[in-house]
Image: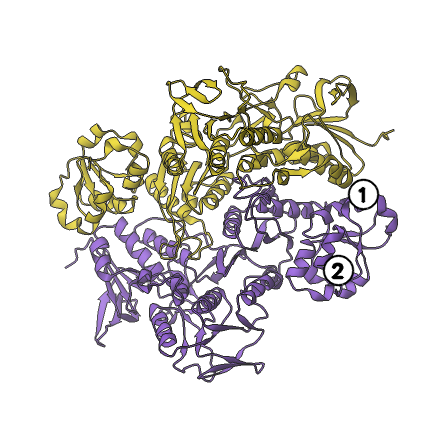
Chain colours: A purple, B yellow
Amino acid sequence: MPSRTQKRIVIVGGVAGGMSAATRLRRLDEKALITVFEKGPYPSFANCGIPYALSDAIPDRNSLLLQTPEGFKKRFNVDVLVNHEVTSIDRAAHAVTVLGPNNETKTVTYDKLILAQGAAPLTPPIPGVDLPHVFHLTTIGDLDAAKAYIAGHKAKTAAVIGGGFIGLEAAENLKLAGLDVTLVELAPHVLPPLDADMAEPVHAELRRNGISLALGDGVASISPDAVTTASGRVVPADVVLLVLGVRPRTELARAAGLPIGKAGGVVVDVHMRTDDPDIYAVGDMVETEHRVLGLPRVTALAGPANRQGRMAADHICGRAVGYRGNVGSAVVKVFEMTVGVVGLSVRELRRMGLDPLWVSAHPPDHAGYYPGAHPVSLKVAFRRGDGRLLGAQVIGAAGVDKRVDVLATAMQAHMSIFDLEHLELAYAPPYGSAKDPVNMAGFIGGNVLRGDVRVVHADEMTAEDLEGMQVVDVRGPGELAKGFLKGAVNIPINTLRENLDRLDKEKKTLVYCQVGYRGYLAYRILEQSGFKDVVNLDGGFKTVAQSGLTTLQASK
Amino acid sequence: MPSRTQKRIVIVGGVAGGMSAATRLRRLDEKALITVFEKGPYPSFANCGIPYALSDAIPDRNSLLLQTPEGFKKRFNVDVLVNHEVTSIDRAAHAVTVLGPNNETKTVTYDKLILAQGAAPLTPPIPGVDLPHVFHLTTIGDLDAAKAYIAGHKAKTAAVIGGGFIGLEAAENLKLAGLDVTLVELAPHVLPPLDADMAEPVHAELRRNGISLALGDGVASISPDAVTTASGRVVPADVVLLVLGVRPRTELARAAGLPIGKAGGVVVDVHMRTDDPDIYAVGDMVETEHRVLGLPRVTALAGPANRQGRMAADHICGRAVGYRGNVGSAVVKVFEMTVGVVGLSVRELRRMGLDPLWVSAHPPDHAGYYPGAHPVSLKVAFRRGDGRLLGAQVIGAAGVDKRVDVLATAMQAHMSIFDLEHLELAYAPPYGSAKDPVNMAGFIGGNVLRGDVRVVHADEMTAEDLEGMQVVDVRGPGELAKGFLKGAVNIPINTLRENLDRLDKEKKTLVYCQVGYRGYLAYRILEQSGFKDVVNLDGGFKTVAQSGLTTLQASK
């Protein structure tokens, strides 16, 4: 019989948000009665590791099982009931109805209720989606079923439907497991948080590793050995993975009359409290403030879920730490490439009605003279006027996660593009450069915002735009083998000053080099030599080439 | 004949600060007359790469030569005169006297003068320091001479005098080049920016790779084949490298009557302007504000030198961007380990009269279930009261530079230990954890600062302290093989609640586990169960073991 002073706390759902809440509650309140009802068979598992368990990257799926109910009981004195589904909430009575594994129901009362039900994978309404070789990839059960099917049926081909983060991880690991993999994505490019120009190198990396891509193409139907796309392409697929994203599990909250927001998640305040002062909700099922937009968004990520669970527990125990919202930091491995994002893409910023500036850079991840340096490509967006950071995309073979985390920290500190010029980052030749790639983005963006250079972006130009301009390639002649822009005249930067009379000062002039720096030098020379209208190509020819903008390039 | 509108700018010294100023000046002012006098034979070289050129890490030292005078002339229209030393400044006449390569002197006038003379390596006043096998490691000339000597004399043994960043890089690369290396350091541990407990694992890594260490030992004398230390140890040394640090080159400025500060560098304002409005100074020769101390410090690092050169140029061209000072971000590779620091060590903070709090953590660099995870050790210091970050030390095999840069960015944004709890960093299993090591440091420090746990630090405890306490090891029995504290009783955390009666609630109780988390859980259980005086061991037994604090450990 609980004493009157013991709080009775019921948590619906384990894993990141629920279990973080449960363990934090216990640490803060040794006496509380804490019960977790988890619909599935595992109280806590590393769902982020599931795609990697498709290959030998994670050979033993048991390493993804973090704790057992017995373990939670012993260590945290928390009762975790797996295979228990909460089917309704009686807010007036402060009670939930629970359906147990043998279809028995019971009623459990609470002082405080925490909903941590996560999100459900989307299933497209297409013929064949219920066939036995079609799987989601959300739970350990999904993983076990897919792996057993692949092994049992000696599957040789796979279709991954959905080119988001998990879709790419799934495609890579199925390929590593020896299957021929086709990735089908409805959008024109993979990884929706990226802009198209930054996604193109990711496509190249996928293709380089033997992944077939069906982009800008939906799924029309699934048959036992193939997927037929909307465009009519037949993709061989002994096994099909559906990884199209998730939607918040809000049915229980909705039935209890708790408000659901426009973004589709349960509405909570900064303490993760719903409209009912005794009911909290955390994790993938809620919507929280996107700090760049200032609007609610559903963020289905493990880090935020963990922090939200902790904060719900804090508030229940009388603490007032508020959740700060999200900036959308994310990273994914794509074979030998790392892709990271924070904030919003240029496309998304514009969709939200903003008019950002942005710059591109392709510096090496560490000093070029030290072995193993690889180029990193950064695209950093910022606000006109004050330069406040709005988003960054970073891709490359090394050092990408570091720059994304630095930029994520800078964004959370409300830094501007000017602040990136000043950032003092740790430098030694194996790790970076005296001017770090993040500094470089700051220098370039600062130059743009101060008006020291005007830039144009390749993905906003057409071949006709080029025809109307005097185009000057200031690279060395040897670099032209990499390709060059239509109509370009080659005047290497080191000879530009003595060749100004070859150019028309009155004509609109586009200068460019390989990555942007020498183009910037050329801009400064021309602009100060009386040229009326000069622009530099942001990110140089490399941006054109790796973005696949062939219409701008001279045919070889 | 220069026109009246052309600024005449003279720069004394090339490399990072001088050349950054020269090239920025040219970008901002196409017409300015810019002359650089460089005492040495190279206008610009990658001095940070020099230690690596001792081994085959950088097989061709020419890759360290960044530009030629001809290249600077062609690209930047900057006159770089190498082997030219500026010997005096006539401030009234706005002129410098220059000594050329054939001992000819000339007088050159300036409108603005920038001093970028760097710092000179320290030479200890000991017998034998002038012998032909003793080298500094500051210039390309030093490198060439040392390498030629090693090859020509088939040197087999080396002594590196000085255990700072460059000393460690030199020791590693001499070892990789096949020499038997002894590192001699006057202080009790290498890398002065580290606290002793964080330096001990670095010692272990050096020893593991065959470097002999002579710590807490000075050099008494150098003979042709050995170094004799102050303690009388004879270190075989066919070659000796002196890397004891540097001092600002202030002779020229001092002779011109420019103020030198208490830290030993030329005094400048935030625009890098000296006491003379037409003379600027940048780089290793100046003192700038240390942002943690609020006091001037000399910071001999390439990144700050680059930014300072840029800002001097900006100010000369009428721009008012100010230098923000330094937080002391630095990183070094030590064989398979990376060591990073930002801000100040606990020892240094105390020396400056501060009374910081700090916490230690040993999380994996990325999700433990994903292959290749390695522990990272973090020590983060912060201010009592508001938790403002004061310093961080990070060591480990992977992911160290990332955490240092995140912490450096956080410090520059004036973040607190509480802010680290909230930081949203990019997570995928190959790169981090849902709770990143930086978040973990925030959680632990936040708990301390909020009073949710009281911690003690192993390096501040004695064996006698342990005797006076009830010491509870809450690890699993299998972990005791790693060693344990003197007098500890083992009660695994999962059985602690049922064993409370084995402990005395009135007695001061120290709990600990392997890295600190289970000790924290134990603290929360005991503290809420009526124990009067409980403390948790910060960083757990791992901190004790890797710090080499054998006096606290039970003999095996």
Q: In the rendered view, would you say B268 is above or below A164?
A: above
The residue where tag 2 is placed is A485
In-front residue for pair B116/B321: B116
| First-in-chain label (2 vs 1) | 2
Tell which subunit mark 1 falls on: A
Residue A195 can be seen in this image: no
Look at mark 1 in the image and give the residue it sits on: A528
Pinpoint the chain carrying mark 2. Answer: A
Viewer-nearest residue: A263 or B511: B511
- The answer to whether residue B447 of the structure is visible from this angle is yes
Under circle 1, the secondary element is helix
**Is B127 situated above or below B69?**
above
Asked if residue A214 lies left or right of residue A445, the reply is left
Residue A552: which disc? none
Horizontal side, residue B235 vs residue B262: left or right: left
Local packing at callout 1 (Cα closer than 10 Å; few below 14, some 14-19, many 20+) is some
